[in-house]
Image (tube, grey):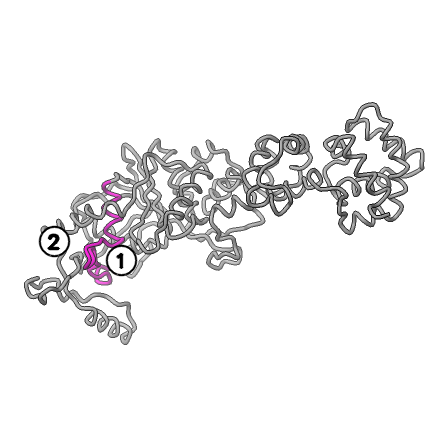
């Protein structure tokens, strides 16, 4: 049992479902605040909600919690929608905007006052500050002292605009039977009368979330364990309203590999950044599902397998650790499993961000695109990201004369140029240009000269790609074609400027 600060039990007016019951229709929700990008933790929360709903034949709803009008932005909202769509996490129905429901939230707060479950409070900012100072001096958290709990609102100063506070139980316990954390207990004496409606008439987060979850028919709330204390507050609001409390599951946060809170240096970036860095949505989705959820030794899951296997009782209580290298390796697996055409289409989506710096522009011309598809079988064997694929394919779009890297230049200079010069006539004489015919010509040349294949192939690769490593040499020659291959070899036999 977890005690969050935790003698008579608080009994809800209508008890929630027992931990062993499932409602007829499961409804989950993902409720991000559009004050920034959709980060890794938020994406995993959305995924867990989506998987749980699909597993039980239910629905996942999307609610944009945009009540913070100063920080909520349209670009952030669009980034959330785009990020979810790219990851393949769909939601049911239209997205609900919390701010648009402010009138409903106010109505509920006033109904609680009418029922005697909430009250108007006219404590001044100075009085609240005095409470804070006293709490600090006594070394305890600040709690409102309930001074307006039983006072007549008519005693308020003329023109004063008060808030509405929940008349929270002051004795007993508030209990949450969490599907991940287990039983969590709070002593009600440690929970004060929280504000439901501010003096300007706007609802607080606590009230808005409860009203929206109830009105949207949410049966299961799956969210980060940083909301665990909120669960106690919100349970009290549900009980005051006589509404069923949804099942709750608070999943641990994601930490960096060093165990510290996840930061940008660990990979706490927006989903859009992972897309730009060349990760495939299926790979990132697969990686996220295994962050904090276990299913034996299985690491690779199709979407169907994820849905079938997912359950909250396999979500651990300890923080998951983000491992960037593991994500890259998993992405490499997905790259190798993808079709050549799929990978070229994926590369095209990152070209606006990466193409201009490589002299490619924002789009592929038809000839280069065809070459890229043709070269993809060799390129994808080693690449871990789409950027590595793009860089590995640089020999396809490099401009003549090629700039050789240091190792490639050494291969050409140390006897390589003479071997290339001797080989060129044999290649020019080929009636057919293919991986097979060029390989036969190079092997024949090496045997005649008493050389090992690598002594010819290595400078040849350097001259054709500008690098000492590349996909299979003869596949490279086939993709480049006769004219381009011979032209590049000629550039090295008679270097520019001589």
> Which percent across, then down, holds residue 243?
19, 44
| Lateral position of residue 262 relative to residue 26, left or right | right
From the viewer's side, name the closer residue of 246 and 125. 125
Identify the residue at horizontal 51%, vertical 36% (top origin). Answer: 301
Residue sticking out furthest to the front:
497
Q: Residue at x 48, y 43 (%)?
A: 290
- What secondary structure is found at the residue carrying circle 1? strand
In magenta, the rendered stretch is: 186-215
Q: Is residue 477 magenta?
A: no
Looking at the image, which residue is at 35% across and 31% down? 57
Confirm whether the magenta stretch covers residue 189: yes
Q: CA distance from mark 2 to mark 1?
A: 24 Å
In terms of image quadrants, where is residue 7?
bottom left
Percent x, y for residue 105? 20, 48
Among the two numbered marks 2 and 1 on one chain, the one whose residue lies closer to the N terminus:
2
Q: Callout 1: few (<14), some (14-19), or many (20+) C-alpha neighbours within 10 Å?
A: many
Tell me the tag on residue 420: none
Vertical relation: 328 (above or below) 160: above
| Residue positioned most to the right | 449
Residue 97: quadrant of the picture: top left
| Residue 7 visible to an observer of this rendering | no
Q: Which mark is residue 113?
A: 2
Q: Is residue 447 left or right of residue 170?
A: right
Q: In the image, residue 176 lies at what x, y percent?
A: 28, 50
Residue 83 location (% of width, % of height): 44, 42
**Mark 2, secondary structure of its residue:** helix
Of tags 2 and 1, the one toward the viewer is 2
List the residue tagged with mark 1: 186
């Amino acid at each position: 049992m977890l005690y969050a600060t935790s003698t008579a039990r608080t009994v809800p007016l209508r008890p929630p479902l027992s931990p062993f019951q499932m409602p007829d229709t499961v409804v989950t929700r993902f409720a991000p605040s559009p004050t920034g990008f959709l980060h890794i933790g938020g994406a995993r929360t959305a995924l867990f909600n989506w998987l749980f709903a699909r597993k039980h034949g239910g629905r996942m709803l999307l609610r944009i919690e945009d009540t913070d009008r100063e920080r909520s932005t349209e670009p952030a909202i669009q980034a959330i929608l785009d990020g979810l769509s790219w990851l393949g996490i769909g939601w049911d129905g239209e997205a609900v905007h919390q701010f648009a429901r402010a009138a409903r939230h106010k109505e509920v707060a006033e109904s609680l006052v009418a029922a005697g479950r909430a009250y108007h409070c006219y404590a001044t900012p100075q009085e609240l500050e005095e409470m804070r100072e006293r709490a600090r001096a006594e070394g305890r958290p600040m709690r409102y002292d309930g001074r307006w709990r039983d006072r007549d609102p008519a005693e308020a100063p003329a023109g004063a605009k008060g808030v509405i506070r929940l008349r929270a139980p002051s004795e007993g316990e508030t209990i949450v039977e969490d599907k991940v954390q287990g039983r969590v207990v709070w002593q009600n004496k440690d929970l004060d009368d929280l504000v439901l409606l501010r003096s300007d008439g706007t609802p607080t987060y606590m009230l808005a979330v409860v009203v929206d979850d109830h009105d949207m028919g949410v049966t299961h709330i799956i969210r980060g364990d940083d909301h665990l204390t909120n669960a106690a507050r919100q349970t009290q609001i549900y009980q005051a309203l006589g509404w069923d409390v949804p099942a709750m599951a608070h999943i641990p946060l994601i930490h960096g590999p060093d165990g510290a809170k996840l930061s940008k240096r660990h990979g706490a970036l927006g989903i859009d950044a992972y897309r730009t860095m060349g990760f495939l949505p299926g790979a990132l989705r697969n990686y996220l599902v295994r962050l904090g959820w276990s299913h034996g030794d299985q690491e690779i899951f199709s979407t169907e397998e994820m849905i079938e296997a997912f359950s909250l009782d396999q979500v651990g209580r300890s923080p998951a650790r983000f491992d960037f290298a593991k994500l890259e390796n998993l992405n490499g697996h997905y790259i190798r499993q993808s079709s050549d055409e799929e990978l070229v289409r994926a590369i095209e989506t990152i070209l606006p961000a990466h193409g201009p710096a490589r002299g490619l522009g924002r789009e592929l011309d038809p000839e280069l695109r065809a070459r890229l598809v043709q070269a993809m079988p060799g390129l994808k064997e080693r690449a871990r990201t789409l950027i590595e694929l793009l860089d590995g394919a640089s020999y396809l779009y490099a401009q003549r004369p090629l700039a050789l890297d240091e190792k490639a230049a050494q291969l050409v200079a140390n006897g390589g140029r003479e071997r290339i010069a001797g080989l060129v006539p044999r290649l020019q004489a080929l009636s057919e240009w293919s991986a097979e015919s060029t390989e036969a010509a190079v092997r024949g040349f090496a045997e005649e000269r008493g050389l090992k294949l690598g002594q010819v192939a290595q400078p040849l690769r350097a001259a054709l790609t500008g690098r000492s490593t590349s996909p299979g040499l003869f596949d490279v020659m086939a993709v480049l074609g006769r004219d381009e291959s011979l032209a590049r070899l000629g550039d090295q036999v008679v270097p520019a400027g001589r």
